[in-house]
Image (spheres, rainbow, N blue to C red):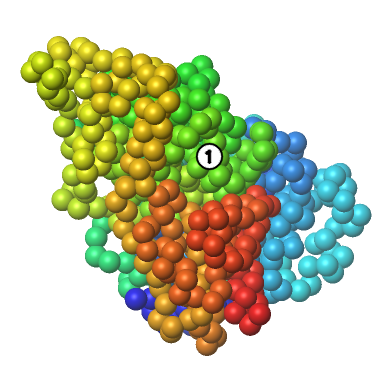
Amino acid sequence: MTSQVSRTAEQADGTNAEEQREPGGTKGVRRLDRVIIRFAGDSGDGMQLTGDRFTSETATFGNDLSTLPNFPAEIRAPAGTLPGVSSFQLHFADHDILTPGDAPNVLVAMNPAALKANLADLPRGAEIIVNTDEFTKRAMQKVGYSASPLEDGSLDGYSLHPVPLTTLTVQALKAFDLSRKEAERSKNMFALGLLSWMYHRPTEGTEKFLRTKFAKKPEIAEANLAAFRAGWNFGETTEDFAVSYEIAPATTAFPAGTYRNISGNLALAYGLIAASRQADLPLFLGSYPITPASDILHELARHKNFGVRTFQAEDEIAGIGAALGAAFGGALGVTTTSGPGVALKSETIGLAVSLELPLLVIDIQRGGPSTGLPTKTEQADLLQAMFGRNGEAPIPVVAPKTPADCFEAALEAARIALAYRTPVMLLSDGYLANGSEPWRIPDLDELPDLSVQFAQGPNHTLDDGSEVFWPYKRDPRTLARPWAIPGTPGLEHRIGGIEKQDGSGNISYDPANHDVMVRTRQAKIDGIEVPDLAVDDPHAARTLVLGWGSTYGPITAAVRRLRAAGESIAQAHLRHLNPFPRNLGTVLKGYDKVVIPEMNLGQLATLIRAKYLVDAHSYNQVNGMPFKAEQLATALKEAIDG
């Protein structure tokens, strides 16, 4: 059950607050239930690192949180330009939350470009902390400011805090043998220290992180620590910040357990390792680096102690080919990719369908087509996952709904692949991959048993009484064929993409046999056991909002807002996209209206209309960013009233 305070907080645009004075102090402390902070600057300003450290300390403190990193595709975008702005948004609260937030309460802008690129997202009254040292005439002209926005009155509706971050950082590091340019690089740590003071964040983790990160350069480590502490002290002593803020830990938001902050890609990596251990199989990753999937390769490469082997191939085709070869050899074969990499892998996915071997294809979706928007999010690969191969080549498709849920989705994809001997497509996206939230570390006895039995000997008796091994003799329940490890005496069999004879596995061009094999492969996918679709409908609503993947957070936040306002609306979210849950058709027919929000032009809606003949209404967005809760709430209210 979700508490009333959670629903109210999701509905509100601002935060609930009460203020008190610090005992014996002159500065007030304002109690908030939640806050949204956005760090923004050039790609080289360290905004992702700053946001990540603030997030880690926030997780340690015990707040619920959700993050949204947003950065350019270029490794080093042009400094001081709007396309070069990198940002990191963090929403944290004393209750359970679902999204990184619609509008920041606080913007830290390291230069004019960062201010201009993000100002339109700020509500009136928001706090803006700007690095005044970067507001030079040339820097302002580069982004179209004819006059300084810090002086022309255009920011009068905000709470402006002009801070010479660069100058203060350089002054704080005078004792170190650093050039001015080297000292200036620590200004993000000064900003982090200031924000850590403002929101009473722990500091021990960041100090330990800096010492570890720069262990081979102790002077750089100490300089960053000095800048971080100087930022904290500046907040404590300056007159410009009269109030600091406290957001209590989210003590009632989480079930009992041990938690850590986790990103979607990290959760996927851990889920794959857990799946291989639960299956007692070595894990093999064949991959080619591509944004935003590369972090899975980076993480898995660190875990050779768990029997993980990673292979960075020369291209996408080689990566999946190696993964399929590993599956043939008895490993849990995995390949990761994004964007156009999925298209390059399509032939080998079809081969895996024909060979009927377990293979996990992890697609971290991004904006397309072609190279498209490498660092922006989208949900536009669903139809490709369903149909993007030659011939009738069905595969199961699953999708996680939150960053932490990527762990469970990886286990579920592995369960299906191993039990049914089929490639499985897991559809994450950039929003989940890079975003983070608290994750309860499961106990080992909570993990599913994924153990498999390899073929051991003959499984068929011929008419003459001789016993032979038939590689396509199927389990009557799952229709899975035996998994025979190459080199096992007596289990020799043909592989390759040419059609096989049902049962014997001999090459076959017989039309009737091909019909049998095509229908059998489809029946195997259709027969996969998946849980029924759960529906959240406490008020017998007439309108259902149906989602999949990363739209879960914004949809749920929007539904909370509407219910808090007295509206009646039902919600359901799909993890299994092929096959659909068996009760989906019945669920859909129980509502007058079905609304499907997607970060594409209506791909799930197309499937729903075609399969169930339901007049589903699409609500679509393809701007590279996740939905905002208020935006969805408005659209759903129109659907209810329409």
Tell me: 221 left or right of 183.
left
Query: Which residue corresponds to the image point at 10% horizontal and 16% vertical from the top-left?
Result: 464
Query: Which residue corresponds to the image point at 71% horizontal and 73% vertical from the top-left?
Result: 124
- Whole-percent x, y for residue 567 in the image: 53, 84
- Image-quadrant location for residue 311: top left
Relative to the observer, which residue lies in front, 362 or 149? 362
What quarter of the picture does the N terminus occupy? bottom left
**Res 28 visible:** no
Tell me: 139 left or right of 478.
right
- Whole-percent x, y for residue 519 in the image: 39, 38
Query: Which residue corresponds to the image point at 44% horizontal and 64% vertical from the top-left?
Result: 585
Relative to 553, is 342 above or below?
above
- Whole-percent x, y for residue 575 in the image: 41, 54
Q: Type of residue at label 1?
A: Phe
Relative to 518, is 234 above or below?
below
- Image-quadrant location for residue 482: top left
Relative to the observer, which residue lies in front, 444 or 199? 444
Relative to the observer, which residue lies in front, 430 or 597? 597
- Image-quadrant location for residue 306: top left
Residue beneath label 1, please?
387
Q: How many marks?
A: 1
**Res 354 visible:** yes
Specify the farthest residue to the left: 465
What quarter of the picture does the C terminus occupy? bottom right
Specify the farthest residue to the bottom: 566
Tell me: 116 left or right of 385.
right
Relative to 26, is 429 above or below?
above
User: In the structure shown, which secondary structural element does the residue marked by tag 1 occupy?
Assistant: helix
- Whole-percent x, y for residue 447 in the image: 21, 49
Relative to 488, is 614 above or below?
below
Query: Which residue corresponds to the image point at 79% horizontal and 72% vertical from the top-left?
Result: 156
Specify the farthest residue to the right: 146
